Each structure stands twice: as structure tokens, then as C-alpha cells.
Amino acid sequence: MYLFAGYSKSSNEDINMNFSEAGEIESAARLFDIAKQFHKEYSFEGVELPGIFEYEVVEEFGEFIASSNLYSNDHPNSYYVKLMIVFTNSWLFRNNAMPPLDTKSI
């Protein structure tokens, strides 16, 4: 939901076409798959979050996906999952929280 909220701040149909080769519903489905994969790869167990993850990371990452797909997209979902892990760890580091050590891939 939050990933799509950030993504949908741009209503440019070209972004949907480049991201999902279709429209908004297909883009939402792809974002949902990315979010599911992220939760399989990343664990917040034992980490006290320094803010509101959904707003401060997930929505911003949705906006990033939209802006980076304005003209083209050659990336599989796994690319976005790894990038979201980097975004998350960066957010934790900036806020003096320790990132989890049990991430499976970076």
C-alpha cells in the first residue's frame, strides 16, 4: 500500500508502461510482488525502528521507482528488492539504528 502510494504520486502513464508494460493495476501487482520478496529477504527482528518505516522508506522508495522508470525499465523485481534493502539500511544508519545482520542478500 505505501509502496504504491509513493509510486502513484506520479500519474504519468509512461511510467506504468515502462514499469509493468501495462497500466496502473499491473504496476500495483508488480509492486506488491516486490514488497513480498523484500519481506522474505529482510528481517527487522531485534531492531528498534527509529521512525515510521512505511512513510520514511517505503513511500520514498515507491517515488524512486516511478522516477527511475520514466523513460525505460530493464530491471527484474530482484533488483528493486536489493535496492530497497540498501534504502532501508541507509535509513537505519542515518538514524543511528543498527541494521539487521541477517539479510540474505544485499
Image (cartoon, grey):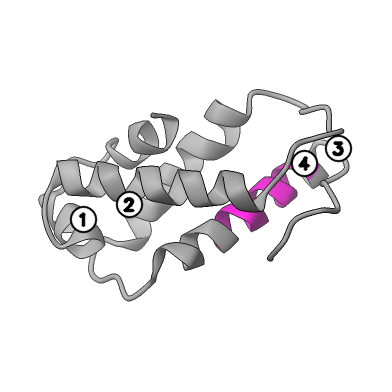
> Mark 4 and mark 1 in contact (Cβ < 8 Å)?
no
Q: Earlier in the sequence, mark 3 or mark 1?
A: 1
For this view, does 43 lie left or right of residue 84? right
Disc on the earlier residue, 1 or 4: 1
**Which numbered marker is on residue 66?**
2
The relative height of residue 55 versus residue 85 in the rendered view (above or below) is above
Q: Which residue is mark 1?
A: 15
- Amino acid type assigned to the residue bearing label 4 in the image: Leu
Q: Amino acid at mark 1?
A: Ile
Dot 3 falls on a residue whose secondary structure is loop
Q: Residues within 10 Å of mark 3 (few under 14, many from 20)?
A: some
Mark 1 vs 2: CB contact within 8 A: yes
* Residue 100 x, y percent position in the rendering: 83, 47
Spatial CA span between label 4 and label 3: 5 Å
Q: Is residue 77 above or below residue 43?
A: below
Tell me the residue that label 4 is attached to.
92
Which mark, by number, is residue 97?
3
Q: Is residue 49 above or below residue 104?
A: above
* Span of residues in magenta: 83-92
Foreground pick, 3 / 10: 3
Q: Main secondary structure of the magenta part?
A: helix
